Image: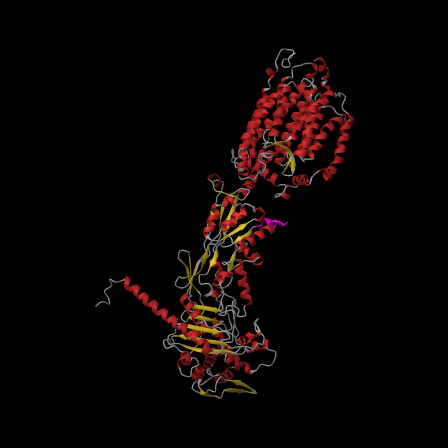
Amino acid sequence: MSLHADEHGFHARDRFDWPLFICATLIAVIGIVNLYSATSVAKAALTELYLNQIYWMVAGGILAVAAASIDYRHIERFAYVIYAGGLVMLVLVLVLARDIRGSARWIPIGSFGFQPSEFMKLCLAIALAKYIHDDPHAEGRTLRDLAAPAALAAVPMLLVLKQPDLGTALILGLILVSVLGLSRIQWKSLLTIFVTAIVALPLVWNYGLKDYQRMRVTSFLNPEADIRGAGWHAHHARIAIGNGGFLGQGYMKGTQNQYLFLPDQYSDFPFPVFAEDWGFLGTMVLFGLYGFLILWAIRIASQAKNRFGAVLAVGVGAMIFWQSFFNLGMVSGILPVVGVPLPLFSYGGSSVFTNMIGLGLLMNISMRRYSYAGADSRLLRL
Amino acid sequence: MSVLVSRSDMGEFRRRPRWLAVVVVFAFLALTARVFYMQIVNGDEYRALARENIIRRVTLATTRGVVRDSLGRVLASNRPSYNVYCVPSKLDMNSVWPRLAGYMQLNAQERERIQKRILDLKSDSGPRKDWQILVKEDVSRDLVATLETHAAELPSVDVVPAPVRYYPHAELGAHVLGYMSEVDSDALVRLRALGYMEGDRRGAGGVERGWESYLRGTRGWEKVVVDSRGRRHVDPASMALIDDPKRLDPIPGRDLRLTIDFDIQKAIHTAMRSALAGATVVVDVRTGRILGMISKPSYDPNELSGGNGVQALKSAYRRLLSDPLQPSLDKTMSGAYPPGSTYKPFTALAALRENLIDTRKQFDCRGYYQFGKRMFKCTHVHGPVALEQAITRSCNVYFYQLGEAIGLDRLARTGLDFGFGQKTGLGTNVESQGRMPTRAWYSQHYKGQFRVGFTLNAAIGQGATTVTALQLALSYAALANGGVLYEPQLVHSVETADGTIVQDLSPRVRRRINLRTEDMALVHRGLWGVVNEEKGTAYNERLADVDAAGKTGTAQVSHQTVGLGADDSRVWYFNRDHAWFASYSPSKSPEIAVIVLIEHGGAGGRVAAPVALQVMRAYHKLKAERAAKKAAAAGSAAPASSRGTP
């Protein structure tokens, strides 16, 4: 039978998810426009970045189309292979990567760097979806049932922490938590996890974190103590956001950005540039788009035709949500500074590709939501 | 296919997506609340912070006022100067340093020295490697232009303007002008309220010190747009960000026109060329204005003001403080010396005012004066002398008996009337007040019984009496003008940079001394005789074309076996007497008083008098020349005038 037609004879393309497509496209376009503002006054080497980003977007779009076209049951079949491939790449990073600013995250390919940890987010979402799909527990999961998915997340997290890349490890962990949030866990197990986490926190603080990571947390908790040092980025990012006011300073007129007070304005700090240029009004539009995109992903999950699709949609949605939330929260000062990119806003091929493929997967799941319509799927209606 | 459906047991996920959605909504509500708080509630504060980041107030330097002499010739002005700095930690030794060294045309030795310094600092673990260091100071204008042209390829290299005070005549008259010195951190605590900042220089001596508040001017400021790297942005869009007020113009310091006549200064300098150390003061007896004032040895104020570089500054200070001839001491007003016989006219006036002598009565000088068991010596055996000859021939014996008759306190009263024992208040250099001893003074400062011998010594200007050359100049001016004691005046007028007179300072009388004309005439005759009578102590030094009256003085120095930092071979010099000549000219209707002190010069008549007489000659010559020039100018300016042409 055809993979592209359901039992009613509809082709998947007839179910094209326009809201998802339009919302994602708007964010991507605004992201590029903002990147242009962010890099317009920086060193000459950076002013071409927005062009690169367009190339990444176009290439990422092709990947997204590919990700949307293949029936995700095939992806399910090769889920662990994909996951294993991601792990191999992460091991390769530790062997091959160049050290850039104290952290080795990139595998050099030509003049570009390839960042496997970005792709690992998707790989993990796929592997978790596969595992949950194969292991239903309608009555709720016990601690023992959680061991395997926890291990699936823990291995890449440890590899990423070794680079070290706290931000990505955090996102990987949060993808796990979100996916488990979709499935049912016994109350007793949940309580045990909480208690363990509270006990583990001081241990992680003392032995698990690097000095610079600890510094970021302390400078978050006491931002005025170290404006020149670790708190410098956060301090000027906050000023930029506040400087936006209601209507913003105008496109390419934000002074914090134009006079170079925002370091990493193209990678981790694009939002302050946007908020300064466009103000509260623009920020609300952007928040609306991100919020809509993530809620739409949850809707796709709730309408998915099977467990794999539902969990994968939540995994991808969680990836976009936690990255957005941590990035926006960090730059606006309600979360400590951890290097997490803003999906479709931050410059970077690996990040763009990952998010584009993720969106393609969402499209994939969405387009096939009625393919095997049965009584089960209706239970998930919001 | 049916297998797939049966495995899709979605029951586990029931209602869960709704909870996930709630989490997402709350997260975005939290972000929205945060952004609302930052952009709307606290927007103004953040905007102010953003403005603070980019708008910087830079101070605009002001220019120090120019000091000119009475005829408008520049004595102290400002010279632009540029220093080259670099930051060791940021300097690329492979590309930038060779380029910089090349542009600066450093010789191998300089290059080696600076390179070593930079490399040492580069390896420094502390913050010092990030501090600017001086590569070269006071570089040429051409080099400044070159470095500015190539600024883009010389990151971390800075050219910093540092205007320096410039004294075109260097050490000639340095003590009158003073010099500039950087404010130290202790003084800065006090001076910050007056607007001084780190690295500022201020007047340290002379007119520079006394008139600092007039000369220094007021800083301005200007708002500029800078980015996080401190680079200035001057494009129109950036300039539009600057809010009002944008700028406060600096106010340049006031210019000063001194009463000093630089030609007189040169004349004094020339006349004193053979003297190692000493002082000369020339005062206009009709106004109290100081026309010339020289202290020897002198120093180069350019070096002390940093104009010749830090090395020169350091060595200049070292020399200044180690020189036994004390070039740092202004010997016209900071040093007090026994006046010796130059004081005798005042002793005479004290006696005359008290009606204690018969001016015609002669007193027999046998070369000494017996008082009790002590013998007080005279310079010669003068034989019988009356007051006038006693002044002319400087007979100590005559003045001993006069002193005995007057008593110490009455002697002091006249001295105080003439301004001795008190500061003149010129206010430029630290001023000594000298000493006019009284019986009260002796009872405070002398352990033993008061002795009449003190009075006898005071009568001839020895003992505890000390005066400054400036005090003596003003008191001789008062002698010459019939008893008007002026306040000394050094600044003629205060002017703006474009020459407008802001403040014209007129002479100020300090005191009119109550003197009888016939008493004055008698003293005048005596002083005239010193130069013009065969037995006068300065007769041998008289100049045919100079009409002068004056008094020689040879002030005894308390003998020392170890000199003031001098080695033993020089002790003879420091034990020699100080030579004085206090005088005025012309002898009838006097115009100037000239006081000359030659430290350790020996006899006053022989050593000091020629200096004073040469200065007087120069004064009269200049006066005649200027009058002729003026007449010529007036003649050519009004050729149409019919008067005078028959």
| In the image: residue B555, left or right of residue B125 | left
Q: Position of residue B223 (x, y in %)?
A: 50, 45
Q: Residue furthest front?
A: B108
Q: Residue furthest top?
A: A8
Q: Nearer the viewer, residue B195 or B550?
A: B550
Q: Where A48 sits versus B278, above or below?
A: above
Q: Quadrant of the N terminus of chain A?
A: top right
| In the image: residue B626, left or right of residue B86 | left
Which quarter of the figure has residue A313?
top right
Residue that appears at 46% across and 66% down: B173
Q: Is residue B127 magenta?
A: yes
Q: Quadrant of the C terminus of chain A?
A: top right
Which quarter of the figure has residue B25?
top right
Q: Position of residue A76 (x, y in %)?
A: 69, 20
Which quarter of the figure has residue B440?
bottom right
Q: Is residue B557 visible?
A: yes
Q: Where B535 sits versus A19, above or below?
A: below
Q: Position of residue B6 (x, y in %)?
A: 73, 15
Which residue range is magenta in the image? B121-131
